[in-house]
Amino acid sequence: MTHRVVTAHPGSSFEQVAWFLRNKDVSVVPVADDDSCSGPLWGAAV
């Protein structure tokens, strides 16, 4: 299993990150809650 860190940078919207995580169907640990797009890191075990 490969472990990846998805980085939400200014060029990547919250929706794009959420879409990626949903389509990977993995366990996600968001650093920021749904109301905040400022969280820099989203951890996902892919």
Image: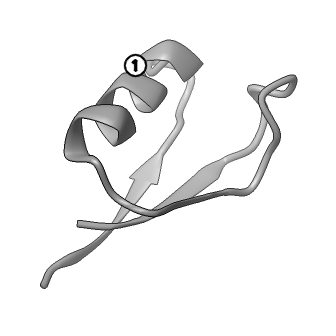
Quarter of the picture containing the N terminus is bottom left
Q: Whole-percent x and y of residue 34?
A: 77, 28
> Which residue is labeled 1 in the image?
16
The amino acid type of the residue labelled 1 equals Gln
Q: Whole-percent x and y of residue 2?
A: 16, 79
Quarter of the picture containing the C terminus is bottom left
Above or below: residue 1 compared with residue 15: below
Q: Residue at x 45, y 21 (%)?
A: 12
Q: Closest to the observer: 26 or 6? A: 26
Query: In the current view of this chain or complex, which residue is farthest to the left?
Result: 1
Please name the colour scheme applied to the rendered image.
one colour
Above or below: residue 15 compared with residue 35: above
Q: Whole-percent x and y of residue 32?
A: 79, 45
**What is the count of numbered marks?**
1
Q: Residue at x 53, y 33 (%)?
A: 9
Give the SS element for disc 1. Answer: helix
Q: Residue at x 36, y 23 (%)?
A: 19
Q: Is residue 4 left or right of residue 34?
A: left
Q: Is residue 16 left or right of residue 24?
A: right
Q: Closest to the observer: 7 or 27? A: 27
Above or below: residue 3 compared with residue 5: below
Counting other residues with Cα less than 10 Å from the Cα at mark 1, is it few (<14), some (14-19), or many (20 or more)? few
Above or below: residue 26 compared with residue 32: below
Q: Whole-percent x and y of residue 31?
A: 74, 56
Query: In the current view of this chain or complex, which residue is farthest to the bottom?
Result: 1
